[in-house]
Image (cartoon, helix red, strand yellow):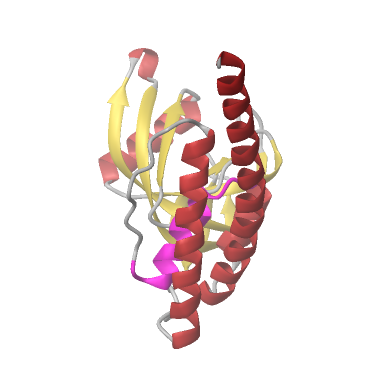
Amino acid sequence: MELPIFPLNTVLFPGATMPLHIFEERYKQMINECVDQQRPFGVILIRSGAEVGGAADPFELGTTAHIQQVERLEDGKMNVICAGGRRFRLIETLHDAPYLRGRVELIEPPHAFDDDTVNLASEAGSLFGEYVRLYLAVTNQWSRSMSFPDDPGVLSDFIGSRLPVAANVKQQLLEELSPRNRLAAETELLGEAIRELSTQVDAARTTRWHGFAVMN
């Protein structure tokens, strides 16, 4: 299978939504061709090189991006909303177009409903809910209920796309094909994030109560 390839400084997970602002001529052409042909393109994190201008060396594993919405602007620029589809592995890069193209193989999602993985998904979901609650408290936002995917593999991608970690860490999660191993890594990352946010929440509460004492 051949795909247009869009190397970016971000990681797209299956099921996640990604907004893009398209302004380079080569990517205007790529998006227009994808829209006309009703086909996806591939998003891969840049290993080295620049996102804009010159050539970029991408990682081997990425995600298909399916165009959901296109807002056309002046000078041919576009705002695009994409949804992550399937993981793929880049087998060969092709340089026969203004933009990068590649021969890829799609990766079949593994079965993820064994007892250990289901139990780990429950733990990861609870931790992610706690992380969201603390994040909203730190940023002075109202807490709200969240629904999580039931499928452990889908849940692991849902969490991975929202974790507050560097792009290279997200890439490691994307490259981990086992939902169980992905969830195990995410529980550790969520534990670290929760400990950090808990400290911030305690500090904010101390400051708030100190302010009330001064007012009284």
- Seen at 58% across and 64% down, the residue is 187
72 is within the stretch colored magenta: no
Q: Is residue 76 above or below residue 52?
A: above
Q: Main secondary structure of the magenta part?
A: helix
Percent position (x, y) of residue 108? 43, 74
Looking at this view, name the residue that lies furthest to the right: 48
- What's drawn in magenta, residue-wise? 150-165
**In front here: 214 or 85?**
214
Foreground residue among 173 and 57: 173
Quadrant placement of the N terminus:
bottom left
Nearer-the-camera pick, 196 or 116: 196
Q: Does the image show residue 142?
A: yes
Q: In the image, what residue occupies the spot 41% across and 50% down? A: 16
Residue 95 x/y as whole percent: 58, 45
Q: Position of residue 39 (x, y in %)?
A: 32, 50
Q: Quadrant of residue 149?
A: bottom left
Say above or below: 152 vs 208: below
* Residue 3 against residue 51 in the figure, above or below: below
Q: Using the rendered image of the protein, determine whether residue 59 is visible from the camera's viewpoint.
A: no
Residue plotted at (36% across, 71% down)? 151
The location of residue 20, given as percent across then percent down, is 44, 33
Q: Quadrant of residue 183?
A: bottom right
Quadrant where the C terminus sits is: top right
In the rendered image, residue 158 lying in the magenta stretch gets the answer yes
Look at 42% across and 29% down and name the residue there: 28
Left or right placement of residue 164 versus residue 143 in this view: right
